[in-house]
Amino acid sequence: MVRIKNNFIKYILLFFVGGYAYCGIEILSRGYSHVSLLIAGGVCFILIGLLNEKYPYRMSFVSQMVVSSVIITGVEFVTGLIVNVWLGLHVWDYSSQPYNVLGQICLLYAFIWFFLSPLAIIADDYLRYWLMGERKPRYHFW
């Protein structure tokens, strides 16, 4: 088993795994992606991974899913404000979706992220276990 102990390398690896996974999801769902989404995905993956690492109590898996979808939606909102509104790149626009905020996020995609978040939670936990020698993941759902 490989043991990555250097925190810089660990977080760079996690960043790119999350970033490329996020871009992959975008390409599968709409046929293209953008470099800003690689950055957003990397940030999301690291933040989701920190849920288990930084809190002294164990969150239930469902709670992690809720918080993860909020994290992803929040990062997507900030990224959208920078990339779409401030820089005017028009990478995405949810204005036609119901319950959207400035066309950058919408309720539908927040729900989708809730159901996709287990992929990120489990991937982060097992990458940390297999490659970084951290504790083996254990989950309780409620």
Image: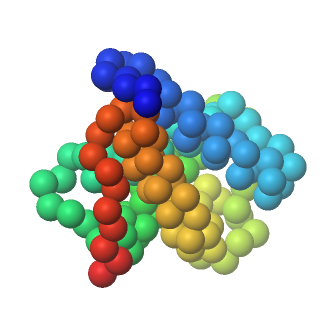
Q: In the image, 115: left or right of 98? A: left
* Way the structure is coloured: rainbow
Question: Which quadrant is home to the C terminus?
Answer: bottom left
Question: Which quadrant is home to the N terminus?
Answer: top left
Nearest the eye: 124 or 81:
124
Q: Residue 52 location, x and y as percent?
A: 28, 53
Nearest the eye: 11 or 83:
11
Q: In the image, 29: left or right of 74? A: right
Specify the farthest residue to the right.
31
Q: Residue 43 location, x and y as percent?
A: 46, 39
Specify the farthest residue to the left.
56
**Relative to 84, residue 107 above or below:** below
Q: Residue 75 location, x and y as percent?
A: 48, 48
The count of marks equals 0
Specify the farthest residue to the front.
1
Q: Residue 21 location, x and y as percent?
A: 64, 44
Q: At x 79% / y 58%, what residue is drawn?
A: 29
**Relative to 103, residue 79 above or below:** above
Nearest the eye: 28 or 87:
28
Q: At x 37% / y 42%, what residue is drawn?
A: 129
Q: Quadrant of residue 83?
A: top right
The reply to whether residue 128 is in sight is yes
Q: In the image, 136: left or right of 2? A: left
Q: At x 31% / y 73%, what residue is drawn?
A: 140
The reply to whether residue 90 is in sight is no
**Relative to 26, residue 10 above or below:** above
Q: At x 52% / y 69%, what residue is drawn?
A: 114
